């Protein structure tokens, strides 16, 4: 009777392990799905489009209102301290989009080149270390040939 109960417990534990394994796989799959942005695009295309539209609206700057006052209006605004007049040094133009893209490209190329050279130097150092270790191992191994024995009187 005792063995029947222990066998039932073993079967139940094995069944629970299988269920747990399936549950872990399912949770893992679900977690990967939830972190994948394409899942949301497939599942909720209209909501994603609305969010993209709202983000685009918020990112684009609002158009500034341009007022072209006449000299009398300017004088009146200055008198009321609503306009502050300062002489400022002429600022250089901000770099254009093409110049910014060019600088980004140059920066990317430089970083990629440095990363490539670092990788190549690392590989070369590893290869040299392996080659040196193999060469040292060969030097330390005794030569078992009778021709190279130091006491041999035969020319070798």
Image (cartoon, rainbow, N blue to C red):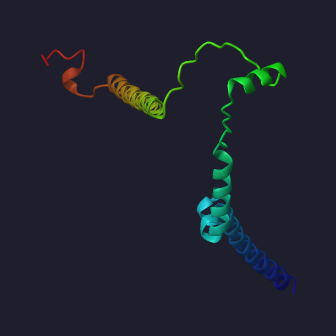
Residue at image position (39%, 28%) is 117
Q: Residue furthest front?
A: 72
Q: Which residue is nearer to you in this view: 110 or 41?
A: 41
Numbered disc total = 0
The quadrant in which the C terminus is found is top left
Image height check: is 47 above or below 9?
above
Q: Quadrant of the N terminus?
A: bottom right
Q: Is residue 99 left or right of residue 54?
A: left
**156 left or right of 142 in image:** left
> Farthest residue toward the left?
155
Q: Position of residue 77 (x, y in %)?
A: 79, 24
**Residue 66 in the image: x percent, y percent?**
66, 36
State the image coordinates of residue 36 (x, y, percent, origin top left).
62, 60
Q: Quadrant of residue 7?
A: bottom right
**In the picture provided, is 48 more to the left or to the right than 106?**
right
- Residue 45 screen position, x and y as percent: 62, 68
Q: Hey, which quadrant is residue 33 in on the image?
A: bottom right
As drawn, 130 above or below 23: above
* Rendering quarter of residue 132: top left
Classify 61 as above or below 90.
Answer: below
Of the pair 152 and 127, the residue shown nearer to us: 127
Depth check: 32 or 105 in front?
105
Which residue is drawn at the image coordinates 87% and 82% (left, top)?
A: 2
Query: Where 23 sits versus 38, above or below?
Result: below
């Amino acid at each position: 009777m005792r063995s029947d109960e222990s066998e039932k417990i073993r079967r139940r534990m094995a069944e629970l392990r299988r269920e747990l394994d399936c549950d872990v796989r399912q949770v893992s799959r679900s977690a990967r799905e939830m972190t994948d942005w394409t899942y949301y695009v497939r599942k909720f295309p209209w909501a994603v489009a609305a969010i993209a539209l709202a983000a685009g609206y918020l990112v684009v700057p609002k158009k500034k209102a341009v007022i072209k006052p006449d000299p009398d209006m300017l004088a009146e605004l200055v008198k009321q301290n609503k306009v502050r007049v300062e002489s400022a040094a002429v600022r250089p133009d901000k770099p254009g989009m093409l110049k910014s893209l060019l600088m980004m490209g140059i920066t990317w190329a430089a970083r990629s080149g440095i990363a490539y050279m670092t990788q190549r130097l690392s590989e070369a150092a590893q290869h040299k270390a392996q080659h040196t270790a193999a060469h040292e191992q060969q030097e330390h191994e005794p030569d078992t040939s009778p021709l190279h024995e130091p006491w041999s009187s035969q020319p070798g």
